[in-house]
Image (spheres, rainbow, N blue to C red):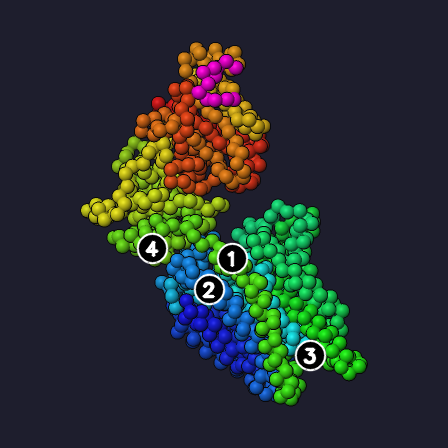
Amino acid sequence: MLLAAVVTALLLIAPGGVTGMAAGLRPMPALAAAGPITVGVAGFGAWAAGALGIGWGWPMFLAVWAGATALAYLARRFVPGADAAPRSPLGRSPMRPTAAEWATAVTSAAVTVVGSVRYLLPLRDLPGGGSNLRQAWDLQWHNNFLRWVADEGIASPTRAGELMNRETAAEMFYPAAWHALGSLLPGNPILQANVFGAVAPMVLLPAGAALLTWVVAGPRWAVVAAPAAAVASIALPEITGALMITGSLPYLLAVATIPAALALLITGRTVAAVPALTGVFLAHPAAAVALAIFALLWWLTRPRAGSLARLLVTAAIVVVLLAPVLVSVAGSGDSVAEYHGQVGIDHVQSAWWTVTGQSNYTQAIGWYPPAVVLTLVGAVVLLLRRRPWTPWPVFGLVVLGVVADSAQARWADPFGEWLRVLGTFFYDMAYRLQAPMGVLRLVCIGVAVAWVAELVLRAWSSARRGRWRDDGPSSASSAPWEGALEAAERSSTRRATAAATVVAVASVVLVPVSWATGDDARLTMTASRGSTYVSDADRRAMEWLARRPHAMEGHVLVNPAEGSGWMYALTGLPSLFTHFPWPDENSEMSREALDDLDLAGTGVPGDPNAVNDVDVALRKLGIRYVFVSPPSAGMAGGAALASRSWAWWTDGLTPVYRDGPTTIFAVDAMFPGTELEEVLTSSPHPPAHPDPARLPRRQPIVAPEGEAVSPLSGAVIGVRADIGDVAEALADATVAELRGRGATVVELPDGDLSDADAHADVDGKDAADADAAGSFDAVINVVVDEEGPGFSGTRVTGLYEGADGFADPGTADLAAGIRDALVFHRFSPGNRYDEEGRPGDVVDGLSPAFGTPSSFGTPEVIVSAGNIDDPAEAKALETREWRVRYARGIADGIASMLRQS
């Protein structure tokens, strides 16, 4: 882990620093801007390698870096006007850093070390250390991408579809500069993601914030403002906190590149700015949009034709370099536009969050009042100060703040729609807008500290000399190197004073700031660690499978919603899905294989030995093994019934491994000779067939051809409603649906199901019909849970304690039929898993759990329809349309049971 951290720091600083100096920057500014330049070189090199079919790795990176450095030198040396003011002090300044630069550099380095250490130390205490798997949504994709770079040598942003869309390899853009650089670290993909994700922003952000603050503050205030901004970079949760918690590591890297790249751009350092801007875009396009907004606001506050021309020329060069990438980016706009960030808060709370830098992902961290106060003070100073007048950071905060506020609590149209269009570049999510706002807050904090320091200095001077001394900025220059000659001519006493200032900042400010925010850093680094999606049983199963015949060939079928696609990053097993969302919509064979897995080897109607569509899909995709590993992630793609439940009963699959809920099936047709027997013999956990009540086979929900009369016609069904308006409305809809299909429905009263007087309060006609029928064919209890949203989801529960599906097939078929029918009617409720089958969430195919016996002596189940994880579905259950769907699901489920009785 330590080696990987050191390599990260050197990788981001050394190559970019050399290229920056070749582009004409002095040593300290070159080192401050080294990170974005390195990211740009690596990102462009990874794309070029992918386009040319060359494997990405250290040789390719070094070759591209050498070429970029040579081009930077030649452009700086021979292209007229390549940089603003070619005869500026930059060209004449000594190479030796000034005292102010040393103060800033040492402080930035100290912040980098402290910030990196406090993120890495928590890993040391976790199982596996630096290789501890973080089971966050985005990390699955990042871990798999890093494995893919190592295996295939592909880190191109325009070829990401080959990893995501295994079946079709459809083109897809994904910013891959983070992965291209991370793959150069020593270690496995998990270690690379953990270390590079934590250290890279700590290398880039302090130095970049210091450089941009130097530009904004001016040469007189820079010696205080720049180090202050560097120190503050570890105290704003909207940058590292929110983005680390969500696993948005490429975007975090991109945000960390913004300040240095922007500083180069607005000071006219075109040669160095081009690779830096390329790095911002290839790290994540959203950060480039934020940077473009900031640059536009900068120009609007000082509109000069020459500055505008230089901005346009710089942008044109970057566009030409990235033209093929931009074409790919344009094709991904629709998928990005699908996201939204509404979080259910009112406008007052949203405004408070916007001002204080909070979002729904920083609530566990909170906010830091000193940082907010200094930001506000710095904003006022920037608006009122005249030499130099640089108010654009304040305007940037206002613009992005308005968009962020509407993203989390939508403004009324037409303004809300206009803001949503701009917010789409940031997935219309406030926390993604708050991150680049955090960069501007760092600038404001640095300026505020410098202003306060000047007030203190003036007061001290006045007390000492008896008069005020105007020691404000003497010029409107905004580039650190433009004050370099003046700084270089200062006496050794002034340089010693600057060094003492660095020590004071490091000891008095950095230490307490780091201590005050240390717990939050640990929280962000340890978030999503555990066994949510990949348990110890899953790991053992993956390791066992990796050693089985043909396991590394073709693909392993997994459910993308279960997270078992991590097997690729962990063991190299070629999972068919490498991320939670469903891949390309044209992946028809993948959908066929997953949704109808239980039809493998079952033939077609009339010919059980024929090859069906599922058999064809499995063979073409090279699927020899199926890996099942509950639970599912909410809002992820991939139905679970076929693989978790129905597959146990098909003739074309053989269960070869089961450890708790973790199960592996082998596809019989893909194993010639005795290979399948050898796989089963080698299994340390050979499975037996499960209880058909807990993992039922596919139920005959759809009426078969030739069924002239519904099984419900003439059936006697008891229906009981739980207390509450929603339950009663659902029960009424169920009664109406059953009667419409010819069933006799007895509406049972509330109370103990074993009550001997259960019929006493039943409507007279219903009681007579029930008595005439002799007994119930089924009893349904309609329930809405009261434990709270997300507690249990929709589930189907049988009531016979101690019974099982083998002894009570009627109840098993009834519960399974209703479960399958609800899913058939588009219910996608809770997706948690319990080894004993409870709560039996519908989408997982785990039902029923058994409770107290009933006196009716007939198949009886509870259908709980509440606390669905998706709030929209929970609300929809109160509508007539969804009540009808619910009722149809119950009716179809009962009919399915009756077809088998």
Q: Which residue is mark 4?
A: 573
Within 10 Å of the Cα at label 2, are there few (<14), some (14-19), or many (20+) other Cα atoms? some
Residue at 50% x, 22% y: name it.
751
* Numbered badge on residue 121: 2
Q: Which residue is mark 3?
A: 220
In the rendered image, which quarter is residue 297 located in?
bottom right
Q: Position of residue 24 (x, y in %)?
A: 57, 82
Q: Position of residue 68 (x, y in %)?
A: 49, 76
Q: Position of residue 362 (x, y in %)?
A: 58, 55
User: Residue 639 versus residue 462: which sits nearer the camera?
Assistant: 462
Mark 2, secondary structure of its residue:
helix
User: Residue 596 versus residue 190: which sits nearer the camera?
Assistant: 190
Q: Which residue is mark 1?
A: 523
Q: Are marks 3 and 1 in contact (CB under 8 Å)?
A: no
Mark 4, secondary structure of its residue:
loop
Nearer to us of marks 3 and 2 is 2
- Up the image or down, 803 lies above or below 523; here it is above
Mark 1, secondary structure of its residue:
helix
CA–CA distance between discs 3 and 4? 59 Å
- Up the image or down, 259 lies above or below 102; here it is above
Which residues make up the magenta segment? 750-761
